[in-house]
Amino acid sequence: MKLTLIGNGFMAQALARGLVNNFEVEIIGRDEKKLNEIKTRISEVEVKVMKDMEDITDKNIIFCVKPYALQSVAARLEGKANVLFSILAGTTLDNLKKQIKSKFYIRTMPNVAASVCGSTTTVTGDKEAKNLALELFSYVGKTVWVNTEKQLDVATALAGSGPAFLSLVAESLSDGAVKAGLERSISNELVKGLFSGYAKLLETTHPALIKDSVMSPGGTTAAGMGKLEEGAVRDAMIKAVEAANDKANEIGQK
Ligand SMILES: NC(=O)C1=CN([C@@H]2O[C@H](COP(=O)(O)OP(=O)(O)OC[C@H]3O[C@@H](n4cnc5c(N)ncnc54)[C@H](OP(=O)(O)O)[C@@H]3O)[C@@H](O)[C@H]2O)C=CC1
Ligand SMILES: O=C(O)[C@@H]1CCC=N1
């Protein structure tokens, strides 16, 4: 089966790398130089500069441009695709249906860890294309089917934006260690180990239990936790996910 990725940015390339071993992959973009650079990095893909009018009849499209570019790119697509898979944050199935013709529509939300086959991708849309969607995105990590776009928007806030939120945690923990006198290279090494070890623990243990197992009475962790609560980190994280979800809804209303 052939997959056509429209857009050649970070996510398109991450998906292409995961998909080339199992599908024919074509990437369509607007910048020949960028496309040729991609071809040198991912030799298995076909690259193509978008025509004034691009025929998508019967193609399986993975749409990978920014949400604001939907209208201008859609205006140059003619014909009816087989399945349109969108990775666009916030952009609703209704909006996609108004702008691009396809037999079936799927909305997905992968994350940046797709570039290392570690995405957890949420998927919703037409049931007829469910199995294909779950298969495609399994080549860049795990997949989770949800029944509503409301769930997909919240998943966008949590798992799509989440790597950026966790980057703030990773970077600031390393900064704290440097402030306390540890060399940056050692701090960064410890943060990497901390995240990978923690990910393994989280597979089997609730976060509250992990916290309780670390925090001894009057100990070092309790001292640090006090400061996190003073800084309202928990509240800030909750508000970050809420704000990202609100933004997805706002994009959806445009
Ligand atoms: N980054 C992330 O972590 C995630 C992003 N997403 C979603 O993925 C989508 C792509 O994001 P990302 O890969 O990060 O963004 P990039 O900016 O890296 O890529 C966007 C791509 O769209 C192309 N593009 C923009 N406008 C046009 C146009 N008018 N005609 C043709 N091509 C156009 C750009 O072309 P050019 O290179 O020529 O500028 C570029 O190839 C977004 O909709 C985002 O919501 C989803 C999950 C996670
Ligand atoms: O912020 C963004 O637009 C994208 C969507 C999901 C993650 N990042």
Image (spheres, helix red, strand yellow):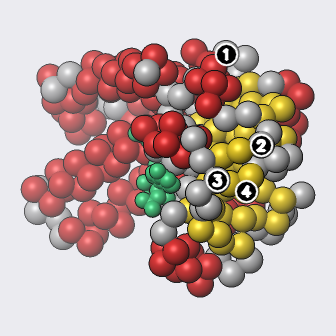
Q: Nearer the viewer, mark 4 or mark 1?
A: 4
Q: Nearer the viewer, residue 41 or 206?
A: 41
N-terminal-most mark, 2 or 1? 2
N-terminal-most mark, 4 or 3? 4
Q: Nearer the viewer, mark 2 or mark 1?
A: 2
Residue position for label 4: 4
How many marks overall?
A: 4
Asked if residue 139 is positioned above or below residue 220 in the image, the reply reads below
Q: Nearer the viewer, residue 237 or 99?
A: 99
Residue type at mark 2: give it. Gly
User: Which disc, if any, is residue 79?
Assistant: 2
Q: Nearer the viewer, residue 197 or 54?
A: 54
Mark 4 burial class by Cα count in 10 Å: few <14, some 14-19, many 20+: many
Q: In the rendered image, is residue 148 in sight? A: yes
Question: Do labels 4 and 2 touch, CB within 8 Å?
Answer: no
Residue position for label 1: 148
For label 2, being within 8 Å of ligand 1 is answered no
